Image: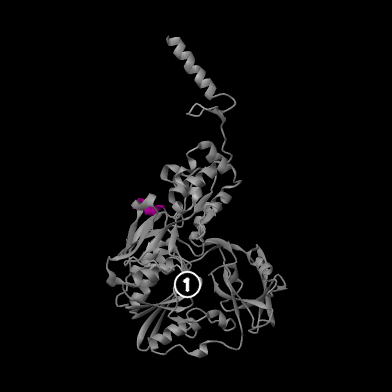
Amino acid sequence: MRKTILLSFIFTILLSCSKDDKIIPKDGAEPVDEVKLNNKENNFVWKAMNSWYNWQEDVPSLADNKDDNTNDYYTYLNSYSTPSSLFESLKHANDDFSWFIEDYVAQQQQFQGTSKTFGFRPKLVQVGTTDYVVMYIQHVSKNSPADIAGFKRGDIINAINGTVMTITNYKSVFNGYYEENAEFSFTEKDGKTLKEKKAITQAVVSDNPVHLTKVFDNINGKKVGYLLYNGFRSSYNDELNAAFAELKSAGIQELILDLRINGGGSVETSSYLASMIHAEADKDKFAELKFNNKHSQQDSPYYFDNTLNVYETDGKKTSEEAINRLSGINKLYVLTSGSTASASEMIINGLRPFIEVKLIGTKTVGKNEGSITLYDSPSSDYTNVNGANSAHKMAMQPIVFQIYNKLGQNDYGDGFEPNILIEEWKHWNNILPFGDENEIVLKTALDDIRGIAAKSSYEVKSFKHIDINVSTNKFEKEMYIDHHYFNK
C-alpha cells in the first residue's frame, strides 16, 4: 500500500514539473501552459504601484485582483516591453508629476542639487509682434560653467549654435541647451544687436539653494530680511539654518522669502524652514501627510520644531542643530512665479493658519501632493534602497500622499493667486540682479512695506510679449519624503 501511495506522489510531481511547464487547474480542467515572465522588473513596477500609488483604487489595472491568476497576470506584464512603459500606463489621468527613474543613484544626487549642466536657468519670450524669440537668464548657479564664463542674470540670448530663435524654430533651436557643448549669442537690450558669443561645456555642478541672504536696514524704519532660496534640499539644511542665524542676528522685523525658482524638494526641510520663520508657533502642527487606504498607518503630522537634522548628500544623517527661529514675524512676503511649487506651496499653506502670507509675483503651480522613491526591494514594501535588487538601478517616483495644513486645508490644486500681480518676464530687457532694491518683484514687496501701492507703470506697454515656459528638468516641481520618514 505504501509503495502505491509513493508511486502516485512521484507521478504527480513528474506531471507538474514536466518539461512542458504545465499548470494543473484546481477544478480538474485540462493542464495549461505556464506563462513565463519576460521582465521581472515589470513585476516590481506593478507590485509597488499597487501598494503605494495615491490613485491606486481609481486605476483599473492596479486592482488588487489583477494578479490573482498568475498566467493572466504575467501575460499582462509581458505586454509591456519595458518597465517604464508599464509605469506610464498605470498613471492616473490627473497625475502630472510621477516619473520613472532609470538610475536612482544619479537621481538622488540631482535631488541634492548635483547634476551635469551649464548652470543657468533661462526664460523664453516672444518679442512684441515680431517672429523673434529671445531668452533672458533668470539665474546662474555659482561656480558653474555659465558662472565661470561670465553669464549673468538678465543677460539676453537670441541664438544657440549660430541659429537665431524664431516663433517657428525655437523648440528645435533650444535643444542645444541640453547638449554637452553649446555656443550662445548675447545681444544688447533690443534682443537683436549681437554683443558676443560664448561657448561652454556642461559640467557636474553642486548648486547651493541658499543663494542669497540680505538685510535692508531702513525700509520705512524697519529692518527687512531677504532670502533667495532655490530648493528644499536636505543636504543644505545647515546652510539654510546659518542664513537664519544671520537674519536673526540682524534683528529683522520683516521677511521676504524669494521662491520664484523654487520648485520644491524635501518635506522635512519645508517644516524646518517654517520653524525658522515663526518661533511663536512653538511645536504646533505645521502640516500633515495622508496616504492611500493601504498605508493610512503612515499618515503623520509634521510639527514646528527647535532642532533639525543635518545630512550628507547621500542622505546619511551626520548631526543635529538647534534651529535659529525668528520672533516677531507677523507677516511673510513670498515672491512667487509659475515655477513655485510643492514644498514651496507647502510653506505658504502651512503658515497661513498662523501669520499673514502675502504673495507677490505670479500664480504658483498648484502641487498639493508628494512622492517617495520606490525601489525593487519587496522586503521593505519597496521603500528601502539598502535592500534593492543589485541587478539594476531602476526605481520610481510616484505620487503617494496628499498634504494638508493645520486646518485640514489642501485646496490649492490650481495654484495660489498672488496678492499683487507682477510679471517679471514683461521686463525681459531690464532684469536686475536678485537682491537689487530696484529689481521689479522685490521692489514691489519693499514698496508694500513702505506703504506704497504697486504702480500701473510697472506694466510695460511698449512691447507685446508671450511667455514661453521652459522646464529645465522633469522633477523641478517635486515634493518628496525619503526612507527616514518610515524609520522615525
Percent across and percent down for residue 406 are: 32, 66
Picture layout, residue 19 above or below residue 463: above
| 291 is higher (above) or lower (below) than 355 | above
The front one of 414 and 26 is 26
What range of the chain is rendered magenta?
Answer: 483-488
**Can you tell which quarter of the image residue 134 is in?**
bottom right
x, y percentage for residue 379?
42, 42
- Check if residue 223 falls in the magenta segment: no
Q: Looking at the image, is 231 positioned above or below residue 23? A: below
Residue tagged 1: 364
Q: Is residue 167 left or right of residue 214?
A: right
- Res. 229 image quadrant: bottom left
Residue type pointed to by label 1: Thr
Residue 347: x, y in percent? Answer: 39, 69
- Choose between 143 and 405: the one closer to the eye: 405
| Image point (51%, 48%), residue name | 61
Identify the element where label 1 is drawn.
loop
Q: Residue at x 60, y 83 (%)?
A: 429
Question: Residue lying farthest right?
Answer: 162
Q: Residue at x 48, y 28 (%)?
A: 27
Percent coordinates x, y for residue 141 in the rendering:
54, 69
